[in-house]
Each structure stands twice: as structure tokens, then as C-alpha cells.
Image (cartoon, helix red, strand yellow):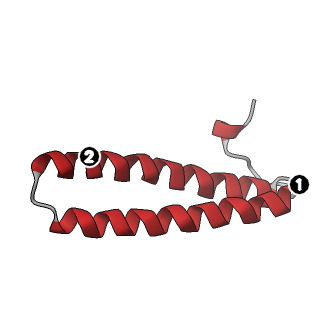
Amino acid sequence: MTLLELSVEYRAHARALDFRICQLQAVLERTENEDQRLMLNERIHMLSTMLREARELAVLTERYYERGYRRNAKYTL
């Protein structure tokens, strides 16, 4: 698998995560139980972090071999 092919996979994961976040936010709006709201907020926060990282990795793998591309320091040694 090439890095470009891998970037497509990261983008697909990002779309799935984004869809799930939207679903959970809709449930959160209808939920009145405070314990459930806290659990939903925690889950949304975790998925949002995963979404951000999937998007960052998609860009990194897409552009890895481009001259002049400044890589995210978070993913370099």
C-alpha cells in the first residue's frame, strides 16, 4: 500500500468519525439525564480527537513526498 492509498483510508475513517460525532451530538441535544450527557460529551471529545488526527495523517500521507511540504512536527522524529 502506498502513502497516497493510505491517505484515502484516513479520509474514509475521518468521514465515518465525523458522521458518528454528528449522530452523538443529535442524541446529546435530546438527552436530559446529566450522567448520560457527561458520557456523551466525553465520547464526542474522544472521537473529535480521533477525527483531528485522522485528518492530519491524511494530509501527511498525501503530501509526504512533495518538495517544500512542511510536515507536522507532531508526526516527525
The image quadrant that residue 14 belongs to is: bottom right
77 or 14: nearer the eye? 14
Disc marking residue 17: none
Q: Please, what secondary structure does the residue beneath circle 1 have? A: loop
63 or 47: nearer the eye? 47
Type of amino acid under label 1? Tyr
Query: Alpha-carbon distance for marks 1 and 2?
Result: 41 Å
Type of amino acid under label 2? Met
- Evaluate if marks 1 and 2 touch, with contact meaning CB atoms under 8 Å apart: no
User: Which quadrant would the N terminus be assigned to in this image?
Assistant: bottom right
Q: Is residue 21 left or right of residue 51?
A: left
- What residue occupies the far top of the structure in this picture? 77
Instruction: Give the label, 1 or 2, closer to the camera.
Output: 2
Q: Is residue 14 left or right of residue 41?
A: right
Q: Please, what secondary structure does the residue beneath circle 2 have? A: helix
The image quadrant that residue 10 belongs to is: bottom right
Q: Residue at x 75, y 60 (%)?
A: 7
Q: Position of residue 43 (x, y in %)?
A: 36, 48
Q: Position of residue 72 (x, y in %)?
A: 67, 45
Q: Is residue 60 left or right of residue 55?
A: right
Pointer 2 residue: 39
Q: Residue at x 30, y 65 (%)?
A: 25
Pointer 1 residue: 65
